[in-house]
Image: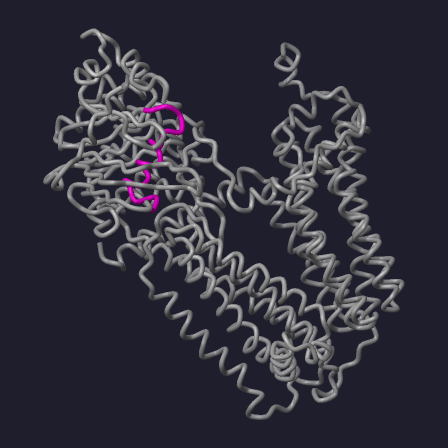
Amino acid sequence: MPVEAPLAQGAPALGAAIDVRGLTKRFGKVAALTDVSFAVARGEILGLIGPNGSGKTTLLRCLTGLLLEDSGTSAIGGHDIHKDPIPARAMMAYLPEVPHPLAYLTPTEHLQFVARAYQLAPGWEARASTILEALDLTEKARSLAIDLSKGQKQKIHLAMAMLRDPQVLVLDEPLIGIDPKGAFVLKRWIKERAGAGAGGVVSSHSLALVEEVCHRVLVLAHGRPVVGGTFDELRRLAHAAPGASLEEVFLTLTAGR
Amino acid sequence: MEVEGERQVYSWLRARQFRGYLRYLREHPSQLMIFLMLPFMLLAFLPLLQTGPVRPVAPDKVALGGVALFVGMALYFLFPVMAGLRGSATVQADVATVSVVFPTPLRRATWVEGNLRRAFRDVTVIGVVGSLLGAWVLSGVVLTPVWADLGRLLALFLPAALLWVGLGVLGGYASLRSRRAWTGRALAVALVPLGYASFFFVLFDPKVALAIPPFSTLAWIALDLSRFLVGAPMTALDWLPLASTWVVVAVVDVVALRYRYELPGPGSSYGVADRSGLSQERASAPGLYESFRLLLRPRFLDWGGGWRALAALRVTFLLRSFAVGFAVVVLVPVLGVSLFTGGGGSAFFASVLLLSLFPMIGGFGTMTEAAPGRSVDRDILRSLPLPPREIYKALLSAPMLLFAPAAVLEFAISAYAGAVVVGLAAAAYLLSFPFVTAAAQLATLANLSESGLTLARFGTLLGFLETLASLVFVLPVAFSGSALGLALIVGAIALVNLLLAAAWRWQGLSRFDAGPPAHLRPFTESA
């Protein structure tokens, strides 16, 4: 199986939403990431797929500065996540793999926190109400997060991301635990943000989601980039028929890895 | 955003979280009871503090050995552990903070600064309350005004505690920022023998320790500071340790407050392998500690069928938990010091320390690592074809295995030191913990409704609260030299434990016999 060269090469991608170069991270004897590089342009959504334990979550946590990599660099909108963290984080919205809202805050208070932390302009309350309603959280808006279900907790994170207009999306398994209506809202939001020029990475095992909202795909296995490109490029690499599903292509490309 | 603006955001967030927590307690009253129970227990034991034939004497007539042992234990063991951990906790972010707060464009240094200020405040409040209590005890020992006792206690212990908070935060941060796992491990490898040596040291009468070269400086400082504590006359040289502490604490704490921290993410330090970046999909490889545990892991016990099978399962879990190692770490020096000193004061204080620490091991060990709901799933235990009385018997086996040797050792040491009554009361005290633990766990297993379950779980926390109460009271009573007071306190706790155990056992057995509550029956029957 031919392994395509990393997506980012040569000089740093100027104006890229995300630029990752040579990321390497080990946990003791576990090599979670080995020399991962890629870039995501503005207006582009990159799908990150790979088998269980392939390093997707570790990659996103390094990218967002929530984990110290052993070597390599990550930049959000041209800002290094460690050297210039504040503007980098100001541009970014992050949805964690497992929802962990603050236990003793209500969904409304989470949004109030976002408004304060990002210094949102007055009038954000109306938008917050619309988002909570769209996500079916209005009835639970004043319940403590500790008393909410897993899906409702995930929706709190989603509502926090949706309250502003982030220029970079970093979404780790965003559909887990979310009901069909919530999933619809999420997918529409991702497409709207990309249409408005935001770039992002969506890590997911749901290949249907990736096919629907992503422009390109990067496949990871054992912490290394296996292959990357548009859906058509991946089909060619997998010697699949032009209309073959991403599932078939993925299974072919990761066979034996 | 300016730093001041960030401080306001973080203050708002903490206030909201606190308000939410109070609301949670209001909506879950059984949780609130835990907090109400603690002051009640402290007050209940308060009158026992000044029991005994101790008469206050002039400062220069006080026997400094016992005082220095207390001072050494606080400065060299309790403060480094408790205040140091409190300090390092200020840079340890929980997963919710990492998920919600850290991705925002707020400086994490401001978050640490807020935590650190709270740590300083907490330690100061605890220091003042503890000093008030200590001044009351001291007034029964030394013929000096209470306000002077309070001033000396504050001047000695508060800066020392604040110093360890500052060292804790700086050490914790250095460990977190390290990209290389070996630095954390090196720190752990260096700290463990140091901590153990300190613990060993505090078991000695400092006058004995003065003659043991590795401990002589520590013993001299402890004796010197004890002289200050009781108000005995001091030379200029005697002021040196205290004055040095004041200077060092000022420097360390200012540095800790001003430092611009940039936390990388979830807290994990002191040699614990940082696998927090791994997702739930990936099986983690064992780190240094886990590898060691796997290497020494005892084989699965096979004691036959019925309740013996369950007992063997729980004892296996206990033997594989950290509680046994911790118990050995505590028991060996206590036994060693008693034999080394040939009974007397050091042996007596060593046994007092054993009394104070051992139930803590039980609390954290038998009630968590080998408790239903964690190592053994509650539903699996409930589905076993065993009568509830046999389940109780099995639940009793693991904690009893841990506490029975400690009780025997406690009695032997106390008797060796000439305090047979204390030894008997202390052995009863230690033996009462397995009963209350097993009964509370039985009640937890038997209750399927949420309110019943919460109440039963509350019982498992009682052991911890009692331990805290004994830690607060046993040491000062021992310090005041009142054997009768000590016997009364530990005897009273043993009695309370046995009464609670009887109540929880009765509740657990009757609940088991009654079956699941009505609203759960259709589900359990269809299952």
Q: Quadrant of the C terminus of chain B?
A: top right
Residue B397 percent location from the top left of the image: 78, 38
Can residue B146 be spotted in the picture?
no
Q: Quadrant of residue B481?
A: bottom right
In the rendered structure, does residue A65 fall within the stretch colored magenta?
Answer: yes
Above or below — where is B331 with respect to B280?
below
Q: Is residue B202 left or right of residue B387?
A: left
Residue occupying image coordinates x 66% and y 18%: B518
Residue occupying image coordinates x 32% and y 54%: B262
Q: Quadrant of residue A91?
A: top left
Residue occupying image coordinates x 42% and y 62%: B170
In the rendered structure, does residue B296 fall within the stretch colored magenta?
Answer: no
**Front position in the image: B374 or A54:** A54
Above or below — where is A173 with respect to B456?
above
Colour mode of the rendering: one colour
Residue found farthest to the left: A14
Q: Is residue A24 left or right of residue B369?
A: left
**Front position in the image: B383 or B310:** B310
Can residue B247 be spotted in the picture?
yes
Residue A246 percent location from the top left of the image: 26, 14
Q: Is residue A162 left or right of residue B363?
A: left
Residue B176 percent location from the top left of the image: 40, 53
Q: Which stretch did the figure color magenta? A: A50-68
Residue A234 percent location from the top left of the image: 21, 17
